[in-house]
């Protein structure tokens, strides 16, 4: 995570001290490195450069318009899971023809919008959804390009909340059922079979599950190609490559490419990838200020102004994030729970963590917060969501203002009888 490093005792994002940004925009504050985000996309693009491919960055990991724009400007495609995400891509200048539309519960309105915008493919997750897409496309006088999301039954050895490729997952169609569903799709006048898709999970830290899944999928890919030789164009191997949060040794994009390309080159198809966390995860931090240090008879608490509504991953997944001072100095270590002000015992960022001793008013940085941070933020406890800043070298700009108390009630009205 070289874009976030200490210089002369201060933590920087690229060429800017985080302290300066916190002083100007307040805390909690998300800060993103454009260099990291664009650089990781380019690593994927180069790693798979030896064959026809499209890197579709997962908008669900970080949907800020400026982040999406930065990726769109260097040629990225996008993996979307809602009509709202497609709208964000379009508003950021992304190309809808380079979007794949996933998700188990697409509505009629979302399907109509995606057809109107001309998405590259729908990743279909059930037979009822396939029939709905066919009906909507026929009503519009169109043929909808689709790829079935096929569940290969591979365990990615990750957290069970983010494991999506096992047989018990709600996602996708089992590999045993896929060919009959493809045969049904081939007979539907509103459907065009564009490819085959898989996605086995997230935060995967070895290439072995990808290789196993790809190898299991190859016979099906060949069968679908024989079924729809005129329209079959792509094999989408999904995303899910992990990042370092603590001591993980996640493979780089080039290592993933080296592992799977021997099986993909011979297909002669366009290869799609859907990375998210591995693009943006280590490209962002959450800067927060210590409010109080509280000592009880049995435990010490460091209470910050950031909370679970700003970054829910530790409370939701029990996930680990490094928490470091923005300003370094010689200091002793303490053991503490690092918590927020939300009225929940689950509002914590770390429990029993050894951290440098800090005092009220000091700034801390919660690292590796660029993915599944702000996108999962809420207004719980009527707290406004944080501001977001994008950094490029010495340049920086506020790319989302902090929510005010007026924003919290902007969509609400009182009934006439009160």
Image (tube, rainbow, N blue to C red):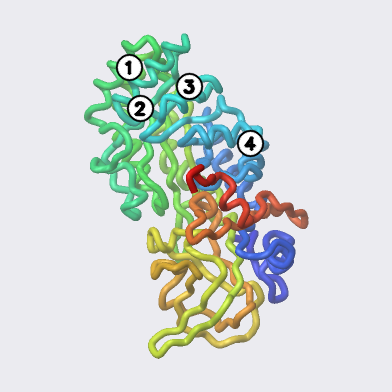
Are discs 3 and 2 less than 8 Å apart at CB? no
**Around disc 2, counting alpha carbons within 10 Å, would you say few (fewer than 14), some (14 to 19), or many (20 or more)?**
many
For disc 3, the marked residue is 112
Cα gap from disc 1 to disc 4, whole angstroms: 32 Å
Q: Position of residue 104 (x, y in %)?
A: 36, 35
Residue 372, compared with residue 318, is above or below; it is: above
Ranked by sequence position, the earlier of labels 1 and 2 is 2
Residue 378, compared with residue 349, is above or below; it is: above
Q: Residue 85: which numbered mark, if any?
A: none
Q: Position of residue 165 (x, y in %)?
A: 31, 42
Q: Position of residue 51 (x, y in %)?
A: 52, 30
- Is 300 situated left or right of 198 in this image? right
**Around disc 4, counting alpha carbons within 10 Å, would you say few (fewer than 14), some (14 to 19), or many (20 or more)?**
many
Ranked by sequence position, the earlier of labels 3 and 1 is 3
Q: Is residue 166 visible?
A: yes
Ranked by sequence position, the earlier of labels 3 and 2 is 3
Q: Nearer the viewer, residue 152 or 116?
A: 116
Cα gap from disc 3 to disc 1, whole angstroms: 18 Å
For disc 2, the marked residue is 148
Cα gap from disc 4 to disc 2, whole angstroms: 26 Å
Residue at the front extreme, as displayed: 417
Q: Secondary structure at mark 1?
A: helix
- Is 70 situated left or right of 78 in this image? right
Are discs 1 and 2 less than 8 Å apart at CB? yes
């Amino acid at each position: 995570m070289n874009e976030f490093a200490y210089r002369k005792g201060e933590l920087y994002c690229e060429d800017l001290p985080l302290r300066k940004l916190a002083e100007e925009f307040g805390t909690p504050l998300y800060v993103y490195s454009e260099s990291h985000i664009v650089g990781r996309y380019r690593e994927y693009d180069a790693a798979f450069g030896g064959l026809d491919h499209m890197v579709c960055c997962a908008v669900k990991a970080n949907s800020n318009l400026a982040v999406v724009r930065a990726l769109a400007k260097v040629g990225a495609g996008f993996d979307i899971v809602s009509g709202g995400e497609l709208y964000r891509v379009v508003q950021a200048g992304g190309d809808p023809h380079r979007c794949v539309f996933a998700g188990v519960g697409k509505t009629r309105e979302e399907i109509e919008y995606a057809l109107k915008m001309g998405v590259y493919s729908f990743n279909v997750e059930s037979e009822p959804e396939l029939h709905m897409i066919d009906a909507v496309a026929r009503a519009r006088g169109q043929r909808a390009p689709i790829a079935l999301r096929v569940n290969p039954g591979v365990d990615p050895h990750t957290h069970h909340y983010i494991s999506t490729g096992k047989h018990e997952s709600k996602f996708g169609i089992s590999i045993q059922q896929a060919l009959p569903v493809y045969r049904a799709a081939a007979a539907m006048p509103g459907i065009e079979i564009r490819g085959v898709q898989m996605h086995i999970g997230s935060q995967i830290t070895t290439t072995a599950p990808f290789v196993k899944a790809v190898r299991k999928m190859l016979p099906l890919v060949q069968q679908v190609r024989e079924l729809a030789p005129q329209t079959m164009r792509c094999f989408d191997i999904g995303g899910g490559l992990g990042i370092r949060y603590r001591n993980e040794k996640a493979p780089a994009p080039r290592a993933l490419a080296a592992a799977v390309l021997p099986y993909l080159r011979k297909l002669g198809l366009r290869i799609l990838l859907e990375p998210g966390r591995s693009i943006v995860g280590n490209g962002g931090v959450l800067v927060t200020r210590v409010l109080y240090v509280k000592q009880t008879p049995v435990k010490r608490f460091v209470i910050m102004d950031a909370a679970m509504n700003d970054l829910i991953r530790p409370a939701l997944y029990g996930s680990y994030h490094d928490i470091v001072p923005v300003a370094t100095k010689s200091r002793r270590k303490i053991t503490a729970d690092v918590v927020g002000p939300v009225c929940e015992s689950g509002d914590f960022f770390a429990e029993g963590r050894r951290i440098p001793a800090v005092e009220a008013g000091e700034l801390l940085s919660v690292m590796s917060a660029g993915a599944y941070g702000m996108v999962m933020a809420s207004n719980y406890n009527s707290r406004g969501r944080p501001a977001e800043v994008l950094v490029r070298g010495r340049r920086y700009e506020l790319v989302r203002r902090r929510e005010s108390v007026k924003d919290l009630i902007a969509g609400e009205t009182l009934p006439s009888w009160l």
